[in-house]
Amino acid sequence: MKTAPKRILGIDTSCDDTGVGVVELLPGGHVRVLANRVWSQTVHAQYGGVMPELASREHVERIDQIMGDALADAGLKVSDLSAVAATSGPGLVGALLVGLMYGKGLAQALDVPFYAAHHLEGHIFAAASEAELHAPYLALVVSGGHTHLFDVPQEGEYVLVGATRDDAAGEAFDKIARLAGLGYPGGPAISEAAQRGNPDAVPFKEPLQGQKGFEFSFSGLKTAALLAHKAGATPEDLAAGFERAAVRTLVKTTVRAAQACGRETVVVSGGVAANRALREAFAQTGLRVVFPGKGLNTDNGAMIALAGAAAITAGRAPSTLDAGATAYAPLANTPAAS
């Protein structure tokens, strides 16, 4: 008897994007993305950063519409869903609660399993939209809120081998773009301006050169950008110099970690993973580098549905309906050896 595919709806409202996606889990564990709808909030641009209460309100106002659009894109009715997954953390608690409670209510109404998903695990499994992921591998999650490097020795086991000491990489992109008057969000703005700038015009020093570990730091790059801005550097030159230094530290540190852990496959995900220069630099490393598919780098619901599909494939038990939202939720379940 042929096994019917499972259709999993994923919801992410961890920050300022309302994301709803649908994936199909086929027999044998193969997955494909059927729909991925994201409403990116623009209200925060005037503040140069995310205002938590405004983000929560926008999620409440948009989530019904975004879910309807995602189901329409997938050609499904709500009754066709086999499971629901929603981000429970980390993130802005008020924003998380919107999607989490919505997902729980939907799962309860449909009488289908509910999975509370970890946001970072969602980012990692976003790469499953492009290639089958089989441990062991290394995973770099690099976004506006996270710069984490995990070793994944086996499915469901995460060892934190490096993280940022200060700002996340994407946060640094945002702050330097704001300093240079390039707009928000900073990632696309920096990438575009950098193509018109001279990366040698501003002497950005790569952070943490010579370290034995695998940490990241971006505060020094921000200071260098501020001093150069005051000295009259053009926005394009600031963007070009900063992007080159940031990309180099991300790639070099990740390559060293892959060598130390003995990994040949590296997953690179999160909003900064969409950066053109970063992708080009990783392509020169000789590693098998897997990036998420189009539209799956930044926060979205499809990556949470993919995390739900991975939980089902691994035989994990569904979450209980009393699963709560949490702002701080470390993914690593095994400490790195000192």
Image (spheres, grey):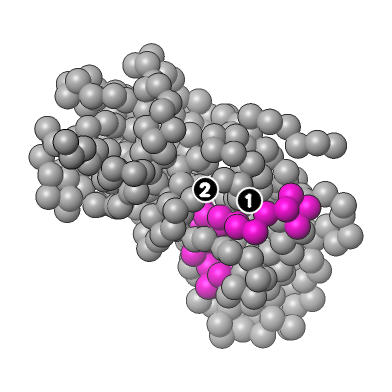
Q: Is residue 289 visible?
A: yes
Which quadrant is home to the N terminus? top left
Spatial CA span between label 1 and label 2: 11 Å
| Kind of element beneath mark 1 | strand
Q: Which residues are magenta?
A: 259-279
In the depicted structure, whether residue 325 falls above or below residue 85: above
Which circle marks residue 138 in the picture?
1
Which circle marks residue 94 in the picture?
none
Q: Which one is nearer the viewer's eye here, 162 or 81?
A: 81
| Kind of element beneath mark 2 | loop
The residue type indicated by label 2 comes to His
Q: Position of residue 258 (x, y in %)?
A: 71, 56
Which quadrant is home to the C terminus? top right
Is residue 274 a member of the stretch shown in magenta?
yes
Residue displayed at 56% across by 55% down: 267
**Outermost residue toward the front?**
1
Q: Position of residue 305 (x, y in %)?
A: 34, 41
The quadrant in which residue 88 appears is top left
Tag 2 residue? 134
Q: Position of residue 16 (x, y in %)?
A: 41, 45
Residue displayed at 37% across by 59% down: 295
Residue displayed at 34% across by 48% down: 30
